[in-house]
Amino acid sequence: MKLCMIGTGYVGLVSGVCFADLGNDVICVDKDISKINLLKKGKVPIYEPGLSELVIKNYKNKRLSFSSDLKKSIIESDIIFICVGTPTKKGGSSADLRQIYKVSKEISSSINKFKIIITKSTVPVTTGDEIEKILSKKNKKKKFSVVSNPEFLREGEAIRDFIYPDRVVIGTNDKKTGKILKSLYSPLISKGASYLQTSRRAAELIKYASNAFLATKITFINEIANLCEKTGINVEDISIGMGLDKRIGSRFLRAGPAYGGSCFPKDTKAIISTADKFKTNLSVIKSVIKSNENRSKILLDRIYQILNKKIKNKKIAFLGVTFKANTDDMRDSSSLKMIPWLSKKGAIITYFDPTGYKDEFSSLKNVTNKTTIKEAVQGSNLVVIHTEWNDFKSINFKSLVNGKKFIIFDMRNIYSSSKIKDQGFKYYSVGK
Ligand code: UGA
């Protein structure tokens, strides 16, 4: 069986490369010719640990190929994964499905034999039905099956998440298709992944409901962290205590800045929009979105208090600006709210991120990128640990002080407050 991945973003590229590594014949297609040319040279346009090595290995052994010829790639393939972007509509909250439908039209005119067409992109409930309608127009005698197979990869951990998923969800009512896809995923199922076959609509909703639930967990613990700060309790004790209950589970209970990235903010808005369409009120998720939007304001207010309500001319260093560690992704990172606000209030900001300079701050007054932690923090009044990169986990702060000691605000609770305080630094964290 030949596989075709349409779209070489996170989802398409990681899944395509991993399927090839499992022994399949995979062609990755993208309309962006420069991207395809880069990939053919073994250069990966996104930052994802381990991905580049797998691209080179599988391209060399010819299980993986790259193309910008969509029609030819579809004709040659048996299983087609649609992996194009579904961003939030400009000025709205629903998912923009234009790329999905454009690709579906292209597929509809290239169905030369039985094909399985799969949405791996995150798509709202009923998108599969719409794709099926588009395909049926030109293919009256049905020679295709439209399936939802959501992905649950995290940026920075994407390869591990692909190889060792908790579950593989296949949304189809067609027995033959289900059998083929179960066999495609059998190497992962035999390593322990649960296999769940549902209706297509259910699979579409499982993805949104999962992301919305994880976002809820994070927002929940962030609000509990606010209460902990007022009551002298350590939020980490609460996370452990709650997490030990198997019904709750310990993961995604780390308090910190607002959740960000390309998925949770987008998908929580999109599920609300779907629910509105079906006249259903998802009040919990609505509150989550509101609370998360307010999170950056709360942390900025803490900075304001820490600096004795004087931000003008204060030197503030940000360690890490991406939305989480092990990615260069800035989408919806809370630093995009915090740094502009501080700059507007007259702060002088330096930042260091292991993934380097960020264009997003280029037009801001007094915001400078530094290429080492030392350069970023020296002479600062306040050092904000914004992202939990390993690079920031064992800093010898004493060796970085040049003159007066800076204050440390650890938004990821990386350090033990007593150890840092013993070194003579004023130290603040989250939820303690
Ligand atoms: C998320 C999901 O975790 C994946 O399962 C899903 O496949 C993906 O979205 C997607 O829909 O494509 P990702 O956005 O890469 O993955 O990042 P996460 O690791 O989930 O982190 C999201 C945000 O939550 C980050 O800002 C992170 O710092 C924050 N977070 C996470 C916390 O604040 N606390 C936690 O305990 C965990």
Image: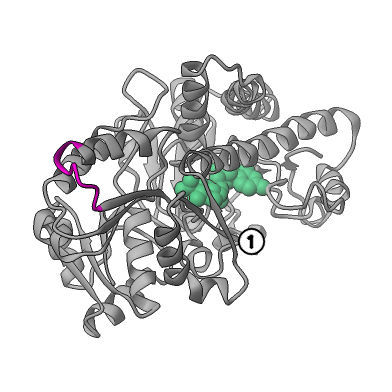
- What are the residue bounds of the magenta stretch? 137-143
Give the residue at the far top of this rendering.
Answer: 279
Query: What residue is rendered at 16% in x and 53% in y?
Result: 111
The amino acid at mark 1 is Lys
Taking depth in this image into account, of 409 and 41 the one nearest to the observer is 41
Taking depth in this image into account, of 178 and 221 the one nearest to the observer is 178
* Residue 386 can be seen in this image: no
* Residue 127 can be seen in this image: yes
Main SS, magenta region, reads loop
Query: What residue is rendered at 30% in x and 82% in y?
Result: 57
Taking depth in this image into account, of 139 and 203 the one nearest to the observer is 139
Query: What residue is rendered at 62% in x and 72% in y?
Result: 192
- Above or below, 224 against 85 in this view is above
Q: Position of residue 175 (x, y in %)?
A: 45, 58
Query: What residue is rendered at 18% in x and 36% in y?
Result: 137
Assign the N terminus to one quadrant of the image: bottom left
Q: Position of residue 213 (x, y in %)?
A: 64, 38
- Above or below, 277 against 352 in this view is above
- Above or below, 55 against 300 in this view is below
Question: CB of residue at label 1: within 8 Å of ligand 1?
Answer: no
Q: Which residue is mark 1?
A: 393
At label 1, counting other C-alpha atoms closer than 10 Å, the crowd grade (few under 14, some 14-19, many 20 or more) is: few
**Position of residue 70 in the picture relative to residue 97 (left or right):** left
